[in-house]
Structures are given as structure tokens and as C-alpha cells.
Image: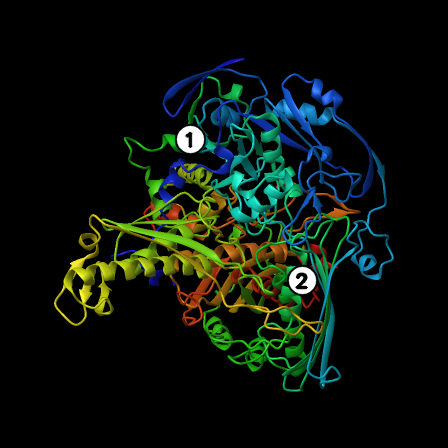
Amino acid sequence: MKSASVRTRREILGASALRPDGGPKVQGSFAFSSDVWADNMLWGATLRSPHPYARIISVDISEALKIIGVESVLTAEDVPGKLTYGLIDADQPVFASGVVRYMGEPVAAVAADHPETCRRALAAIRVEYEVFEPLINPEDSISGSFPAIHPNGNLLRHQRVVCGDKDATGQIVVECEYEIGMQDQAFLGLEAALAIPDQDGLGVEMIVATQWLHEDRKQIALCLGIPENKIRLTLGGVGGAFGAREDISLQVHASLLALRTGRPIKMQYSREESFFGHVHRHPAKIWIRHHASAEGMIIKIEARMVFDGGAYASTSGAVLINAVTHIQGPYRCANAVVDGFAVRTNNPPCGAMRGFGVVQACFAHESQMDKIAIACGLSPVEVRLRNAMRIGDKLITGQPVESVAPVERCIRETDAIPLPPNMTLSPHELSIPGGSGRTADRQHIVRGVGWGVSIKNLMYSETFDDFATARCRLQDGIVTLKFATAEVGQGFVTIAPQIARSVLGVDTVFVDPTDTLIGSAGSTSASRQTWMSGGAVDGACRLVRERLFEHVASQHNIDPLQLEIDDTDIVDTLGDLRISVAQASSGVFFEETFEHHHRPTTDLDANGQGNCHVAFAFVAHRAVVDVDTELGLVKVVQIATAQDVGRALNPLSVLGQIEGGIAQGLGLAVMEEILMVDGIVKNPSFTDYLLPTALDAPDVVAVLVEEPDPQAPLGAKGVGEPPCISVTPAIAAAIRDATSRPITRVPVRPSDICF
Amino acid sequence: MNVNIVVNGINTKGDIEPRMLLVNYVREHLGLTATNIGCDTSSCGACTIHLDGESVKSCTILAVQADGGNVTTVEGLAIDGVMHPMQESFMQNHGLQCGYCTPGMVMAAISILKENPNPTEQEVRAGLEGNLCRCTGYHNIVHSVLACAGKN
């Protein structure tokens, strides 16, 4: 597909326009939030609990305050407003009060003249704990056998989905329990912010790397006990996000310290602190039983899904809903009995990560599809084609899949991609499992091929109106756009000008700073910004175009409905008028703001029925792996994929999302897991938490399936999450194919292959 | 301790604590913030710079070890406002998304081509193994390096 990414003369929609921030980023002039400084600023730092579960007997800050250079030490007593925050349920304390519920929970914060002074001050704070046995088994949270560790109880959410005939059976019955480990988003740019107090001490300005400025502002305002309009947030350069910046991390702490000291506060986490400072992907256990006909058609799904939400709710409830409503995969299924539980434990809080609950469900349903295929004597491709969802089919929630659902095409296009050549008899050492250690022997290396196909919802669900706002101004042939959409690397800063150029026939487009001086854009998550903020930019530009046409029409005494944009001109479709947009907008300006709202959704009822999702995207992955069966090492050789993108507004950007998402899915398949023992995190560093390197990243052959979605403002579906969803089960299936081992958990460890 | 380090062709001086890492000297003492810190454990390579012509992770070197040395950061690559071909190649080949790894990647990539002007794709991948990227899956980074070497 690379060759298809031809750049057109004008960088309009469909062109592989380059990132406007590419120049500053390669030259180092792009300011990440960690690069921002202020005169007279102090450094902030956080004291965190070393225990997963303990009662705080006392906190003594007196010694810390004596250290020269320490300006302030804050604890729970110093929070002026709401004592807790959270995205859905505000159940997480700004600072622990009375009890700590996970290793790494904030207990105090300091402001001092230097990071080293901060470190000494944190060490000087005396916290006396009475350590309790932690709640670490999610089943204890479900059964109620462990006393509540939080006033809201140990069960975060239970959702049942029942549809069709719950007594239906099939000739083929396959069941298994699957397990998914805790993955970290592991963005490279560590959490960082600069908080600057207003001169009157009544408000604060913050430059911060986040996914959703307005939600941050709302939560900060509540905890500070001041109106939202006294807080202004500007997006600092964001070094990746992947869900980990959706929750509050250091925002409230930095703001509190700034207001208390009256001086700018810079906070930034170390990598170790980052592991404790943001939520992770939920570890999950999924028991699932499929009933199918002898021909491999799915008749019924039964499942029990348990998601460990850790100590605080974050987005666990929404993650769970995604999991239970996607457990059928992109396949027809008339009957289902599904129970999902998101529970509280003394493990680190879990929340949003790319794929948001669907990753876990997909590993289970795709592993099951292969079991059905084996039981029925079908190929992995055939069993999926026979069950592939089509437009009009229903989810187990009763929601019909509308608009565009090219599941079969995604599978066929992927299947048509040539397999890679077999490994040679004497391969290069870097191409074999284990890499340059030269530990694998050629005769122990076995190749396997596996499949994964997925469905992913786009935008927020369950009645949430996650609208997006954008403003467009046209003057002298130049467009200026304004929105609060967080650019986290995904490329909205590229897409937005392409939209304006397409709608308004201009070439020069500026984007104003991203801040809270305009309405919310919603979160950069749920694969939603191209659809939502793209829709808002498109809407604002169309309004401006109407004004421009009215202006031109009145000057020439014609009907504005006769006018249209042709390249960079306005033309009269019924006459001879042709005038450039630059000329037509010379000396006047038009400015319009537009909010894009997606169609409304509903809640789920007690049986999990309801049209709770907005839209869906589909993708197929085929993995080819080489496995050293003696050492249990895996090399992912190739990922073939065909993704339902609706319309590729920027093919180069779409491919970048696909390739990056696949690397993250590979990480979950064979490398990445936060390891815990009794609630203690054992590997909070990049030396112990392993990320895919350039040598681990497989060859990727991608096909973009373009069937424009009429429900999407620009025809384009979100492309961020699908790449990392079904690639993980595809790799696991390939390992299964190579080794005949059951492979019921990811990440796959050497011991899962060898013993 | 006093140090004298040439950074991007300019003599710099500092009276610094012996424990100061070179990356902190560059970022905080000189205010050259292009060089990023991503892990603190010399795993990610975001802080890769050139010291006396060799690429090094500047979080693994004390500033005092660079005393008398010659440092280049990504800010010092452009000549008379013209980007280094490797910078241009990363920009043209979409070799970045969030861009946090980019300064380190560019510095590491320049070293790869200096040592081996005509690398294979696998040699480029091996050369970049010490630099993590979480956004791109490395494909366009590898393309950028190969394109800079005249290969496509």
C-alpha cells in the first residue's frame, strides 16, 4: 500500500500530507510538556505508598518542612475542594486519607527549589502504616468474601447480557478459560506539567500533556474548589498517550502546589513513577463456551468475564461494557448468556488503553474460533467467513450493525496477501527467535500461522454525548482553525488542515494553540477524533463556506446555491463566474464555530440489551511466527492485515497507525506484562518491562479497505484502536499452530511453550 | 566541579555537581530541551546524542566525563538553517508520530550511516535496537534511515 500513498498536488483529503509538526519535531524545537519552564518556578514531587493496602496511622511532615528549599508539603488535609476525583466515579483520593489502597497511591506532595530537594523532602516525611493483607483475587471481590476496601464496595460493575434462547445448544461445544496480563501504555513522553498561579491567587494556568483538556479542567476545578473559568489549560507537547493520559495524574497536585506557594510548579514523573502514576490495561480472566453447528456456525455463546480494575474505578465500568458487548466478535450470534464483572482490588488501578476492553474479549473469541474450526474440520479462514457479520446483523445486545461492515472482505483481502518465504536453512542470526544471542538452533524452529478478526466500537457509548467543537476563520484566503483536540501523535494536526483545504479551496491553514479557550473536543481516545473533531472542523468550514458563497452571490446578484468550490476557486455552476477563494475573501472575514454530536446511544438494560454503541470498525490480522520450541522463544515474522477504514483521509497516517498498533499488539502477545506479587509491582522500569524494539517489529503488509461510511461526517472510520486488537490473538494462534500447545494466556511466556 | 564542553560548536562552561548527568547538563544547564528523557535506565535511547562523534545515551554519562569533549545534539545538526539529510528524511518519510523518540532516533541513525553508509534493512534495525518508539512500529523510522542512505 505504500505505493498507493501518492501525494497529490494539493494536500486535501485523501492525500498523504506530511505532519505540520514534523519539522519542529525532527529539529528539536517542538516543546513537549516536559520542556516547559518558567521563571521562579519550583519543582513538585509526590510521595507514594509502598504498600498495596494499609491504614495510615500518622503523617508527619515537620522534618520535611525544615529542609532549606522546601516551600510546601501538602497532604489530604490541604485539599480545599472535593477530596476525590475520577473519570466516571470520583472515587480516587487526591491524597490518601486514612488508608492506602494500592502500591504507588499518592500520600503527599512537596514543592521545592530543585528535584533533589524534593527527593530529600519526600524521604523526610514520616508515614506510619498498619499494613493489611491486600485484596488481590478478583473472585473475592465478586463473592463478597473480602471486606470492602472502599466505601463504594469491591464490585465496580456487573453487567449481564442475555439474548435469544439461553437453552440453545449445538453439536459442537468448545470451552476454555483465557487470561490476559496487565499491559502498560508505555508512552515515551513521561507525565509532565507546568502550573502557573494567577497573580490574584484565585486561579491557575496549566500546560499539560493530556488526552482531554476540558475533562482535566473539570476535575481540577472540583478538587481546588474554584470555578472552571478560573482554570485555563493549554496542551503541552504530548509524547504518546494510548489511554494513559485520560485519567488525572499530576494535574491536581501541581495546581494545588502552585496555588499554595504562589509560584509556578513544574512536575514530571520518572519512568518508575509513571508506572504508578497512570492506569493500565485490565488484566482479565474470561471463561467462554461456544455452541456451534457441525458446519461451524455459532449458535450460542456463554461467557463469564472478570476484569481486575485495581483500587479505583477509573473507566472500568465502560471497559467492561465494551468487553461484554464485543465478546461475540465480528460474527453472527443469536443466543448468548454473558456475565461481566469489573472489580476493585488492591492492585494498581486499571482503565483506558488502546482497544479498551475489546482486546481482552478478542483474545478469547478468536481463540475459540480456532477451536470451532478444529472441531468442525474447517480452516481458520473458512470458519470466520461462515460466521462473518454483515450489515443488518445484530450484536448480542440487540443493536443492529448498520452502515458498513466489510468483515468478509477484510478476511479475504488479508488471505490474499502472500505469505513470507520460509526460513532458509542457515538464517541470519537476527532473523531467528531470540535474535542476536544466537541461542536458537535452526532445527528447533517451527513456523506457525494464525488468524484474528475483530470488531471495535468507535466513540463513547451508553448515552454519553462526547461532542467536539471547532472554529474556522477565513480571511484573505487564509484559514485559521481552533479546537481543543489533543494531538498525542495520532495526526489530527495533519488531518484538520486537509479538511479545511478540501471544503474551502484554500492552501494555507493555521492551527491556533490547543487550549480551553474554546469548547470541548472530547477525549483523544476511542478512535474518535477523526470522526468527532474532524466532523466539527468540517462543519465549521462548511458554515464559513456558506457565508463566503452568500457574500460572493450578493456581489454578483446570483443564488448562492449555484456556487461551488473547484480546486481553489469559487465557480458558478450555472454561469461564467470564477473567482479565487483568496480574492473572494480579501478584506473580509468569516468565522463560524460548530459542534459535532454523534447520534444518540442508549443504556443497556438489566439483560444487556440496548443500542449502546455509535459505530463499528472491523479488521483482520494474519500472523506468521517462528518459534524455537526448545527455548520457547518467538519471532513474529509477518503480520498481514486488511482494515475497514471507511475512507483513508491520509493513507500515510493510517498506515502509521496500523504499523504502530500492531507493534503494541505484538507486545501484549509475547513481551509486555506488569508483574505483581501480592499487589507489589515487580517490574516498573524499561529494563524489566519489555517493549518491542526495531528488531522485534514484524514485517507488516496492510490493505486499506475503503468503503466510506455514510454515517461518518467524512466517510472515515477511526483507525487508532483496531490495529492492536486482533493482532494479539493472531500471534497467539500462530504460536499454537507451530507448537500444538494450548496457549490460553497472553503474553505468551517461554514456559507456556516449553513445559 | 568546573567543566568545559563544546556543545553544538559553542564552548559551554558549568560549575556543576559531579553527579550531574550529561543529559541534565544539556537540558537544564544549557536549556537545550530537544534531547529527551524517557526511562532513566538507559533502555529507551530518547536521550541519544553524539559525544566526540559517537552516539551515546546521555543518561549514562556524567557531565564531568564529557569535560573537554565535543557534544552534538539534534539542535546542532542544521547548518545555516538547512536540516541535516537525516532530519529531512524522517520528516519526509513520516518517521515520527508523537516525536518524543525522534531526536534520539535521528542521532542514532546518523551514527549508523557513519559507520555503515550502505546498510541493509536488518542492519538498520539492529543499529536502532537501543532506541524505543511506541508510536510507529519502527517501519517508517527504518524507511527514513534507508532513504537517507539512498535506498528506498
- Of the pair A184 and A88, the residue shown nearer to us: A88
Relative placement, left or right, of A708 versus A745 is left
Question: The disc labelled 1 sits on which kind of residue?
Answer: Thr
Q: Is residue B139 above or below residue B16?
A: below
Number of marks present in the image shown: 2
Badge 1 density bin: few <14, some 14–19, many ≥20, Cα 10 Å: many
Name the residue at 57% across, 73% down: A330
> Label 1 marks which chain's residue?
B
Alpha-carbon distance for marks 2 and 1?
46 Å
**Quadrant in the picture for the N terminus of chain A:** bottom left
Measured from the top left, where is residue A737 in percent x and y? Answer: 63, 69
Measured from the top left, where is residue A112 in percent x and y? Answer: 62, 23
> Label 2 marks which chain's residue?
A
Badge 2 density bin: few <14, some 14–19, many ≥20, Cα 10 Å: many
Label 2 sits on a secondary structure element that is helix
Q: Is residue B65 above or below residue A336?
A: above
Label 1 sits on a secondary structure element that is loop
Q: Quadrant of residue A650?
A: bottom left
Q: Is residue A231 above or below residue A530?
A: above
Of labels 2 and 1, the one closer to you: 2
Task: In the rendered structure, find residue B73 and report the number of the disc placed on it.
Answer: 1
Measured from the top left, where is residue A271 in percent x and y? Answer: 61, 38
Residue position marked by numbered label 2 in the rendering: A320
Task: In the rendered structure, find residue A736 and report the number of the disc placed on it.
Answer: none
